[in-house]
C-alpha cells in the first residue's frame, strides 16, 4: 500500500472526523469515576457518535465488538468494554475511539486516572506518555522522517525509566483506518520514510511502566504487559503541512 498524501480539502474532512472523536472522548472522560463500568463508557460513546452523524470506526473492524477500546492498568490496548469491568479508585483507563464521517477517519486516545488518588508512579507514567506524544508531533515536519518521530518519543520515555511497546505502532490514516506508513514509537533519527506535505499520521505512544513486552489474552484482542505493570496510551491524528504539524483531533 502506497503512502497517500491528502489535499487540503481531504484534511478538512479529517478535521471534522477528528473533532467528533475529541467530543466523544471528552464526554466519556467526564464519566470516569469509581463504580462506573467500561460498558457505561461504551454506551455513551456510541450514542455520541450516532448523534454526530458519524459511524464508529472500530465496531466490526476485524469483528471487533465495540466502538471503544477501554484498557485498564496493565492492559495496553484493545481492551473490550464490559459491564463486568468496573473502574476502581486508583486505576488508570485508556480510552481509544475512532469514527468515520463522509468516508474519512479520525482516531485518538487518552489515558485518565480514576478518582483522585493514583500513585505517583502512575501520575508520572501518564504525564511522560502524553509529553512523548507531543514531542513526536513536534518532530512530524516536512523533510523529517518517521524515525525522527519515533526517536523523539523513545528518548523521552526511556530517559524517564519507562519503556516503549514495540508490537503496536501508529499508522497513516485517511479513507482507511490504517494506512501506510507504520509509525513506531521508537526509531533512529533520519531513518524511515520521509515526511511529505499532505501525509496524515496517527501518532500513538504506548508506554509501559516496566518492560516493553506484551501478550494478547484469550479474547484475541486485549493486549497486556508481560510483567503485569501499568501501561498508558495517548494518540492524535496529525496532518503534515508546510507550516508544521496540525493536530486534527484537538
Image: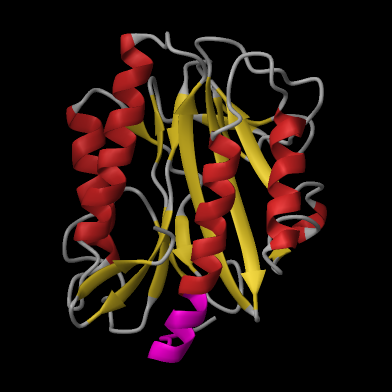
Whether residue 56 is situated above or below residue 93 in the rendered picture: below
Residue 135, x across and y down, in percent: 21, 50
Q: Position of residue 172 (x, y in %)?
A: 46, 69
Question: In the image shown, does 55 or 132 lie closer to the viewer?
Answer: 55
Does 213 sit left or right of 52 as displayed? left
Colouring scheme, one of rainbow, by chain, secondary structure, one colour: secondary structure
Q: Residue drawn at (17%, 66%), measured in percent from left and top?
A: 190
Q: Position of residue 78 (x, y in %)?
A: 64, 40
- Image quarter (top left, top right, bottom left or bottom right) of the C terminus: bottom left
**113 over 65 or under it: above or below:** above
Across and down, in percent, residue 166 comes to 43, 43
* Left or right position of 29 against 58: left
Q: Report the residue at 54% width, 21% height from top.
A: 74
As drawn, 241 above or below 130: below
Quarter holding the N terminus? bottom right
Relative to 108, is 73 above or below? above
Please identify the quarter of the rendering in which residue 192 is found.
Answer: bottom left
Residue depicted at 28% across the width and 82% down the height:
196
Query: Would you say 223 lies left or right of 125 here?
Result: right
Q: Nearer the viewer, residue 187 or 45?
A: 45
Please say whether residue 186 is one of the residues in the magenta stretch.
no
Q: Is residue 3 visible?
A: no
- Give the residue drawn at x 33%, y 13%: 121
Q: How many marks?
A: 0
Q: Which residues are magenta?
A: 3-14
Query: Is residue 33 visible from the viewing direction of this image?
Result: yes
Q: Quadrant of residue 105?
A: bottom right
Q: Nearer the viewer, residue 51 or 190?
A: 51
Amino acid at each position: 500500500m502506497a503512502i497517500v498524501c491528502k489535499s487540503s480539502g481531504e484534511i478538512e474532512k479529517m478535521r471534522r472526523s477528528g473533532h467528533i472523536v475529541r467530543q466523544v472522548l471528552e464526554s466519556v472522560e467526564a464519566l470516569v469515576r469509581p463504580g462506573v463500568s467500561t460498558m457505561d463508557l461504551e454506551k455513551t460513546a456510541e450514542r455520541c457518535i450516532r448523534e454526530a452523524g458519524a459511524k464508529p470506526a472500530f465496531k466490526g473492524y476485524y469483528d471487533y465488538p465495540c466502538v471503544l477500546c477501554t484498557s485498564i492498568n496493565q492492559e495496553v490496548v484493545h481492551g473490550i468494554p464490559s459491564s463486568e469491568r468496573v473502574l476502581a479508585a486508583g486505576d488508570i483507563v485508556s480510552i481509544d475511539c475512532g469514527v468515520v464521517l463522509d468516508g474519512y477517519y479520525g482516531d485518538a486516545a487518552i489515558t485518565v486516572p480514576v478518582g483522585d488518588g493514583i500513585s505517583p508512579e502512575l501520575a508520572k507514567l501518564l504525564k511522560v506518555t502524553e509529553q512523548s506524544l507531543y514531542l513526536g508531533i513536534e518532530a512530524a515536519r516536512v523533510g523529517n522522517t518517521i524515525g525522527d518521530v519515533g526517536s523523539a518519543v523513545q528518548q523521552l520515555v526511556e530517559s524517564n525509566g519507562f519503556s516503549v511497546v514495540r508490537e503496536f505502532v501508529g499508522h497513516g490514516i485517511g479513507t482507511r483506518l490504517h494506512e501506510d506508513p507504520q509509525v513506531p514509537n521508537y526509531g533512529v533519527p533520519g531513518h524511515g520514510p520521509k515526511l511529505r506535505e499532505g501525509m496524515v499520521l496517527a501518532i500513538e505512544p504506548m508506554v509501559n511502566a516496566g518492560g516493553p513486552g506484551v501478550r494478547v489474552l484469550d479474547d484475541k484482542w486485549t493486549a497486556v504487559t508481560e510483567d503485569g505493570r501499568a501501561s498508558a496510551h495517548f494518540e492524535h491524528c496529525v496532518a503534515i503541512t508546510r507550516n508544521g504539524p496540525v493536530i486534527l483531533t484537538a
